[in-house]
């Protein structure tokens, strides 16, 4: 009977294991689903809308085949469409379960003198790819992002595209069938071994009631080869080997179970119970724009700026620097290039930090111009402080440019919005701050000129103002040096005024703002005697920038100071604090 049950267990185990393995192999179905996209027309760009990419669950895999170079990039749909306003393109969408295709004509003519539109290297893309003949790239994009596909931006875009999604095949009974069959297989083996053991015992001699035959006594004197050994039981070595062989079979079966059936989708999944989600610490208004850059995007932009400016610095190429610098940051570098070309001992300005950013504060804005602030680590030295940068983009086709850079000198703790939320831009004439951004540079310049006599002196935190302390010490030193030789024939005076660069202000979460401004510090030396002249033979910087070695009217030298402030709200009792500064000579000219 044991053999019958063993055979039944073997048969049932084979059926269960076979059925489980079949669910994971021949009955599993396709693992991917593909959508071929045929593009008609000769437009140079193809926009694959996010609705197409998210029409199936899971990540996406893009495959494009075309002779020559193939370009693809992804970004926010609104950004890509804004960039495509100067080009014809084909828009691929998804509506009512069907792929749609529409030709879109350029809606905005290119400005006169601008370069031809090319997709490679735009700062709007979150990432871009370029391959020859065949481009294959995995993606995982949400519905508000889209794909841009092209060749070189002038030739027709690729016509054959395929998007593939993974198909999740759930076989919830494969695991239980394989494991259950393996258990039955072990049970059958046990029954089989017990049956063999029982059969061997039942075949033994039945000696009960049977007289034993008369035996002769054993001659114990037999020697040598004739002497034998009588074994009471037969050898079991064959049985032992057989048991080991059968024991190995369930082990192999269990191994097959581990390899074949033990994945999450091979088991029944309990219904997921709803779990409460944590509430957001930052409430984003419905009408607030999206952050203009991501962390990775900002780091790539700053790295591009760093490399371009490093090359321009080495060649003293102001035109190349202007492709990635703007405003005061560009102006002081152009001055430095002029001085380095004329003065062998003149040093270059500090390099722009690479893309390793500690903090970014992107503007929440769907329009242009756009700005983000970033904090980059300083150098390796003990005295190297972190740097704060202001980077702006004027329109969808322009690269981001560094407009202000300063060394952080304050430990002020700021309540900043997360990078994925972005900061609200503050209007230049905002009445909700302690001082409107438009008036901040002039107010601070008044403090630098009049000191405690300024009407704005009480609005600024002088105790934590490293720039004002450094400026006062520098002015005192220069005045003392001038008076040693020129006090009888001339005078040196100091003043400050608001720079020409417009302010940039981004809100903090406590209703304050970080504001970047430029303040010019001016040194003016004029003769006090009608017969005297001011000579600058010993000042090669002034001589180089002014173009003359002496003047009967004097010289004015301007230093551009790039400043970042924290400005509290109008209702706050806090004072305006300086976050960081940088100071560089900007120009020198004859007093006219």
Image (spheres, rainbow, N blue to C red):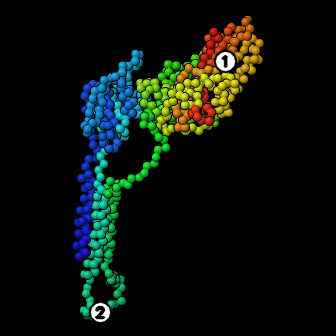
Element on which disc 1 rests: strand
Rate crowding at label 2 as few (under 14), some (14 to 19) or many (20 or more) other CA atoms within 10 Å: few
As drawn, 397 above or below 14? above
Foreground pick, 573 / 316? 573
CA distance for labels 2 and 1: 139 Å
Image quadrant where residue 88 sits: top left
Residue denoted by label 2 = 216
Residue denoted by label 1 = 523
Quadrant for the C terminus in the image: top right
Answer with left or right where residue 443 lies relative to residue 224: right
Whichever of labels 2 and 1 marks the residue nearer the N terminus, that label is: 2
Rate crowding at label 1 as few (under 14), some (14 to 19) or many (20 or more) other CA atoms within 10 Å: some
Q: Where is residue 436 in the image (x, y as percent from the top left)?
A: 56, 27
Foreground pick, 374 / 10? 374
The structure residue drawn at horizontal position 76% and vertical position 15%, both measured from the top left corner, is: 487
Foreground pick, 531 / 286? 286
Q: Please say whether residue 259 is visible from this viewpoint.
A: no
Quadrant for the N terminus in the image: bottom left
Q: Position of residue 586 (x, y in %)?
A: 60, 19
The structure residue drawn at horizontal position 35% and vertical position 34%, both measured from the top left corner, is: 146
Element on which disc 2 rests: loop
Label drawn at residue 54: none
As drawn, 24 above or below 286? below
Answer with left or right where residue 364 lies relative to residue 191: right
């Amino acid at each position: 009977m044991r053999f019958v049950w063993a055979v039944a267990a073997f048969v049932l185990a084979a059926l269960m294991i076979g059925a489980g393995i079949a669910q994971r192999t021949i009955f599993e179905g396709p693992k991917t689903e593909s959508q071929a996209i045929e593009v008609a027309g000769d437009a140079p760009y193809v926009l694959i809308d996010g609705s197409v990419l998210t029409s199936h669950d899971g990540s996406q895999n893009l495959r494009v085949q075309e002779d020559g170079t193939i370009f693809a990039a992804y970004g926010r749909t609104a950004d890509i469409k804004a960039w495509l306003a100067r080009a014809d393109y084909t828009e691929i969408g998804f509506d009512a379960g069907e792929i749609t295709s529409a030709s879109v004509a350029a809606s905005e003519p290119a400005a006169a003198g601008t370069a031809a539109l090319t997709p490679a290297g735009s700062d709007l893309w979150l990432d871009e790819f370029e391959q020859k003949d065949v481009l294959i790239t995995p993606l995982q994009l949400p519905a508000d992002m889209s794909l841009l596909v092209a060749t070189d931006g002038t030739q027709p875009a690729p016509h054959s595209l395929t998007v593939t999604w993974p198909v999740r095949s759930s076989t919830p009974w494969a695991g239980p069938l394989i494991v259950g069959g393996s258990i039955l297989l072990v049970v059958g083996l046990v029954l089989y071994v017990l049956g063999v053991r029982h059969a061997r015992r039942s075949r033994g001699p039945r000696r009960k009631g049977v007289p034993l035959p008369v035996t002769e006594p054993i001659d114990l004197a037999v020697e040598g080869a004739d002497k034998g050994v009588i074994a009471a039981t037969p050898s079991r070595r064959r049985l032992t080997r057989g048991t080991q062989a059968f024991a190995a079979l369930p082990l192999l079966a269990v191994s097959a179970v581990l390899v074949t059936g033990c994945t999450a989708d091979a088991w029944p999944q309990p219904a997921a119970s709803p779990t409460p989600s944590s509430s957001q610490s930052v409430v984003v208004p419905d009408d607030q724009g999206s952050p203009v850059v991501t962390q990775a995007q900002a780091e790539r932009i700053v790295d591009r700026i760093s490399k371009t400016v490093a090359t321009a610095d080495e060649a003293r190429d102001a035109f190349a620097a202007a492709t990635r610098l703007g405003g005061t940051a560009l102006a002081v570098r152009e001055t430095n290039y002029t001085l380095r070309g004329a003065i062998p001992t003149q040093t270059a300005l500090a390099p722009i930090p690479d893309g390793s950013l500690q903090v970014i504060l992107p503007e929440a804005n769907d329009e242009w111009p756009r700005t983000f602030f970033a904090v980059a680590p300083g150098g390796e030295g003990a005295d190297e402080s972190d740097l704060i940068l202001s980077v702006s983009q004027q329109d969808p086709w322009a690269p981001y440019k560094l407009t202000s850079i300063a060394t952080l000198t304050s430990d002020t703790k700021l309540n900043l919005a997360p990078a994925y939320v972005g900061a609200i831009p503050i209007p230049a004439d905002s009445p909700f701050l302690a001082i409107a951004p438009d008036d901040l540079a002039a107010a601070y310049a008044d403090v630098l000129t009049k000191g405690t006599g300024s009407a704005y002196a009480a609005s600024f935190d002088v105790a934590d103002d490293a720039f004002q302390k450094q400026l006062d010490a520098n002015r005192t030193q220069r005045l003392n040096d001038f008076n040693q030789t020129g006090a009888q024939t001339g005078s040196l005076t100091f003043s400050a005024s608001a720079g020409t660069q417009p302010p940039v202000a981004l809100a903090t979460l406590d209703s304050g703002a970080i504001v970047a401004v430029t303040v010019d510090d001016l040194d003016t030396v004029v003769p006090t005697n009608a017969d005297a002249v001011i000579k600058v033979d010993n000042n090669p910087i002034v001589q180089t920038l002014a173009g003359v070695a002496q003047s009967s009217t004097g010289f004015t030298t301007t230093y551009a100071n790039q400043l970042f402030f924290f400005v509290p709200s109008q209702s706050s009792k806090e004072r305006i604090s300086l976050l960081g500064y940088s100071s560089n000579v900007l120009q020198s000219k004859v007093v006219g």
